[in-house]
Amino acid sequence: MSKYCQTITELREEKYLVEALKEMGYEVEVLPEGAPLGRYYSEQEGKTAHIIIRRSELKGAFGDIGFARQPDGRLVAIVDELDQQRGYGTKWLGRVQQLYKEKQTLATARAKGYILKSREVVETRDGQQVRLQFMVRR
Amino acid sequence: MQEKTITITIDEQGNAAIDLEGFEGRSCDKAFEDFRGGDRVRMERKKPVFYTSRQPEQKKAQR
């Protein structure tokens, strides 16, 4: 039997998210109890996050970017609307998730005994894809 | 015996396609669960296996 599936990545494992953000060049604060995100004007709604990149790390950003732990275990990105238009929107978050998924997949494969056969970066009409191929250990 | 391979393709949104080849029975589901990593499944299908190397011999019609 062979099978083909498509999955929607959900950020759940802090370790791989932090690794992904570090690979993108950011210093990251991990705050198990949560901390407020920095605001650029006082009327803005205050928000709390558990993983924070401070605005000093984010070129051109007005505020901090955070990831807040939800009751169901997901880590959800908090990005100000203005910053979403300044390079920290869907594409930026997609890159975070792509790195996260690759790190999670490689770590899972190692832990479960699969062998990495190849890693390719493929240019497609829909953008850059990372293709990982594994074999089952005999 | 066909080699068991798993190909994971991660797109620019970080979503993944998991392609399992050469698996039989429960080992296919196990490998899938190993790589799903708690993510939501958007689409799933089982692929038919085609054996191209063992075509039945055609008998010549005798007159």
Image: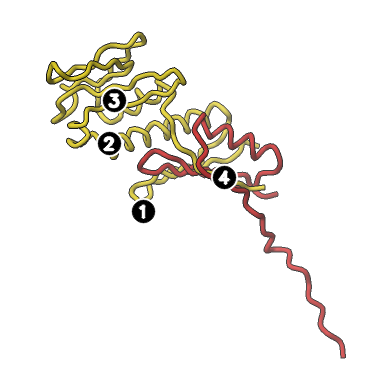
Q: Which residue is mark 4?
A: B44
> Do labels 2 and 1 touch, CB within 8 Å?
no
Please state which of the two labelled residues, at mark 1 or mark 3, is closer to the viewer: 3
What residue type is disc 2 on? Answer: Trp
Mark 2: secondary structure = helix
For the residues tagged 3 and 4, is the chain the same? Answer: no
Q: In the rendering, at what x and y percent does residue A123 appear?
A: 35, 52
Q: Chain of mark 4?
A: B
**Residue that extends furthest to the right in the rendered view of this protein:** B63
Of residues B59 and A29, the one nearer the viewer is: A29
- Please tell me which of labels 2 and 1 falls first in the chain: 2
Report the mark closest to the observer, 2 or 1: 2
Q: CA distance from mark 4 to mark 1?
A: 22 Å
Chain letter for yellow? Answer: A
* Both labels 1 and 3 in a single chain: yes
Asked if A102 appears above or below B1 in the picture, the reply is above
The residue mark sitting in front, 4 or 2, is 4
Mark 3 lies on a secondary structure that is strand
Amino acid carrying label 3: it is: Ile
Q: Which residue in the protein does label 3 denote?
A: A78
Q: Which residue is mark 2?
A: A92
Give the alpha-carbon distance from disc 2 to disc 1, as whole Å. 18 Å
Cβ–Cβ under 8 Å for marks 4 and 2: no
